[in-house]
Every structure is written in structure tokens, then in C-alpha cells.
Amino acid sequence: MPIQTYALHPGFAAEASYRDLSERLDDTVIAAIGAALKTYPVLVFRDQHLTDAQLRDFALRFGPLEIGRPAARPGRRRLAIPQIGDVSNLDEDGKVRALTDKRRLDSLGNRLWHTDASYMPVPVVFGFLHAVTLPPPSPFGNGETEFADMRAAYDALPQATRDAIDPLVAEHDIFWSRAQIGFTDFEPGDREKYPPSPQRLVRRHPVTGRKNLYLSAHASHIVGWPVADGRLLLLDLTSHATQPGFVYSHDWRVGDLLIWDNRCTMHRGRPHDEMQPRDLRRATMLDTASTLDEAA
Ligand code: OGA
Ligand code: MN
């Protein structure tokens, strides 16, 4: 194996070692990382130092990349490469955004448990998140990122519950996840550009064949159910799936590169000192079809 792993959380998160992911890697290395992600859908590489172009090129080895909502907006941007998501609290000029800055408020939706882009008709596969600048510790938190194992959460449900939820479809909506934190200040045209998308509530992982919950803060209700009932079910399942036993909390170091599988995990950012820069860069691999087209 060209990479070694050791578990940070049994069966779900691992540290992986490879000397330098900025090099042009052999196909066998990419295949080994893909294989490790089957067992450990959260993989941590330490001491990597990638430019945005190197991060993009590395992520591209796995598949085509998403251009996220912020990068798709017209106007000036801090980062040059549209496939690199700006996961920071910095404005176009690299200054820490004001507390009331609407881009900041929109991005605070990442503090809710979610899987990326589940509001898109075709959601995403791997997230590649690289730490460039980190804030010092604060009383509210250090900007950790937490991950939850949606396979273990599914397996832990009673059989009757699994049978009952297996055929359900949830509607995922970026407007709903933001409404939960009081953010409604979307751009004109965003509603039309990002309509809600239906997604299976239970997915079967196309590579491992294992079933898992597919939950997200974007999930607003269950299709065909009264909104209230669906929302309450989603709340119950989310509380179940994010119990401490299913969660790995990542303490960031500069140079970390995390890769996670959005199909079978949820994640959320934690608070930090908002006056200090926190700068991470993300590339995200697109999936090829709706979850509705996957095998049940
Ligand atoms: C993300 C995300 C959380 C964080 O990059 O997709 O949700 O801790 N990040 O920044
Ligand atoms: Mn995210």
C-alpha cells in the first residue's frame, strides 16, 4: 500500500500518511486513497502544503469538481480558481469580515450538521479541505470540524425503523438551512437558481454497498408527508446520528488536508474567535446522478 492509515475513530476516521500530495501522483496512490476512503470516509493527511492550483489538480484526479455557490456569484473574489471554495471569514481583500457581513452570515450555515450541496439535484462526493491559516483557541471553540458517521447511525436504528424510512425521500433546500439561523438575505434570482432538490433519506453507498442515512441541515421535510411530521422525523434522526459515539472532532493544524465522503457522513464547523482569520480552501468532487437514481 502506498499509504498507511491508523484509526482516529474506529471504522470511520483515520490519519493517513503520504509525504507530499502536491506532487503529480501515481495512479496507484490515487487508488490507494480511494480504497482507504471506503473504510474510513474521513481521512486526515498532515503536513501538506498545497497551493490552490495543486489542491485543484489533486482533487481532479478523483473526478470533476464543483463550482460552489459563492464562486458562482458575479463580482470580485479573494481566490482566483473557481473550483476552490473559500472556506474562510475573509473578504475580497483578505480582511476579517464584519460580524454583520452577509457573506459571513450565509457561511455560518456550515455550523449546522450538513452534507455539502445536498440541495443540488446532483450532489457531491468527496470534500478536500486544506488548512492555510487557523485562529488561536477561544472560549467559544477553536474552529474544529466535526464529522458524523451516517453508516453507523443507520445500523444502530431498530430494524422496524430502518424498514419504515428506507423508501422515504427528503426535500433539501439551501433556503431552509439558512432560514434556521435567521439568514434570508439571498440575492435576487437565487431562488430560481437553487430550487429545492429531492434526495433519498437512506442511500446505499455505490462503492461499498453499505446503507446509510443521508441527512443534512438542508433537508426541510419528507416528500408526501405533512411538513411538520417530516421535519420532526428529520430532527429525531439528526439527533440520533450526531450522538457523541458517531462523531469524530477534528482539531485543525496548518497543513492538514481532510478528505471526506459526503455521501455517507455529515459535518459541521464549530465556533471560533471571529476577530481572527480562519482560512481553509476546499475542492469538492461532483457526483454523476441524483440519489433518486441510485439502487435502493
Ligand atoms: C465545508 C464546511 C466547516 C468548517 O467546508 O464544507 O462545512 O469547519 N466546513 O469550516
Ligand atoms: Mn460543508
Image (cartoon, rainbow, N blue to C red):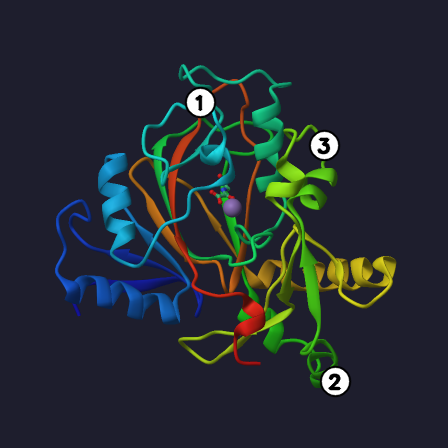
For disc 3, the marked residue is 184
Structural crowding at the residue carrying mark 1, measured as other residues with C-alpha within 10 Å and reported as few (<14), some (14–19) or many (≥20): many
Label placed on residue 20: none
Q: CA distance from mark 3 to mark 2?
A: 38 Å
In this rendering, is residue 6 above or below 210?
A: above
Q: Nearer the viewer, residue 136 or 127?
A: 127
- Helix, strand or loop for disc 3: loop
Residue 166 lies, in percent from the top left, at 67, 78
Residue type indicated by callout 2: Ala
Structural crowding at the residue carrying mark 3, measured as other residues with C-alpha within 10 Å and reported as few (<14), some (14–19) or many (≥20): some
- Helix, strand or loop for disc 2: helix
Residue type indicated by callout 1: Pro
For disc 1, the marked residue is 277
For disc 2, the marked residue is 160
Which residue: 71% across, 64% down? Answer: 237
Residue type indicated by callout 3: Thr
Q: Nearer the viewer, residue 240 or 203?
A: 203
Residue 48 lies, in percent from the top left, at 23, 42
